[in-house]
Amino acid sequence: MRRKSSVWVYAGVAGCFGLVGCTGDFANVLASFGGFVAGRRGEVQVLVINNTSFRAVFTLGTYNQTDPASVPDFSQFSHDADGLVLEGDESSPIGVFDCARVFGIGGSRLIDLIERNVDESDVLPEALIDGVEFFSVSEADGEPISQGRAAPFEALLGVDFPCNALLILRLEVDDAGPDPFRVDFELIPSESTR
């Protein structure tokens, strides 16, 4: 019995090195971290384009979902003028994150890892939310007014993106969906000439 099991595991692992016929979870766990030097991680570049007319507040980053003690590589967009603010009809600067098993925006696993493993003084609580929240800002008193949210977004290494790629996220109004806003995803691999 043991020998038969190890043969099946070996066959499954061997088949997944080319990532053909692999399940998403298996391909994600076996995907390379993409460093150009042995033992080093590659990076992921991220551009967020806000195609709405509202300010977007959210947390995004990369993390390893199998390690509950890991510290995510993350960034936050909020109302704080001293930090990152993403107004409507604007694009973020291109962010660079360590390559990890998951890239996410406002997902529960990302938020949980930040709350457990990052010092509170390094976190903006208003941006540590589920998904992306959109705000209009009143000219009279400057007070932000919520216009609704987009659902959290996650992409898996080896399934949805490789290391050293550019991930483009577009924040859009969603008239047809269950939420008033959505996150659209586009990938430009590192091999691309674009």
Image: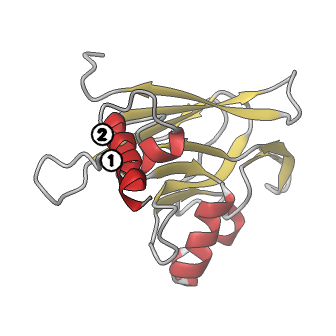
Q: Which of 45 and 11 is in front in this view?
A: 11
Looking at this view, name the residue that lies furthest to the top.
193
Numbered label attached to residue 10: 1
Asked whether residue 80 is in view, the answer is no
Where residue 130 sits, quadrant-wise, is: bottom right
Task: Where is residue 168? Give x, y as percent.
Answer: 48, 31
Q: How many labels does the image show?
A: 2
> Where is 34 relative to 77, above or below?
above
Whole-percent x and y of residue 172?
Answer: 70, 28
Residue beneath the point at 85% across and 34% down: 180
Q: Tell me: 144 left or right of 154.
A: right
Please name the amino acid that badge 1 sits on: Tyr
Q: Which of 102 and 95 is in front in this view?
A: 102
> Where residue 21 sits in the image (x, y, percent)?
45, 28
Is 105 located above or below residue 126 in the figure? above
- Give the Cα distance between marks 1 and 2: 6 Å
**Can you tell which mark lies on residue 14?**
2
- Answer with left or right where residue 191 lies relative to residue 44: left
Q: Where is residue 59 in the image (x, y as percent from the top left)?
A: 60, 57
* Residue at 52% in and 83% down: 119
Quadrant of the snapshot with the N terminus: bottom left
State yes or no: discs 1 and 2 in contact (Cβ < 8 Å): yes
Question: What's the residue at 85%, 27% (across, down)?
Answer: 177
Assign the C terminus to one quadrant of the image.
Answer: top left
Crowd class of label 1 (few under 14; some 14 to 19; many from 20; radius 10 Å): few
Viewed as shown, does residue 14 lie left or right of 67? left
* Mark 2 residue element: helix
Would residue 58 be seen by someone viewing this image from the given angle?
yes
- Lateral position of residue 81 relative to residue 62, left or right: right
Give SS at disc 1: helix
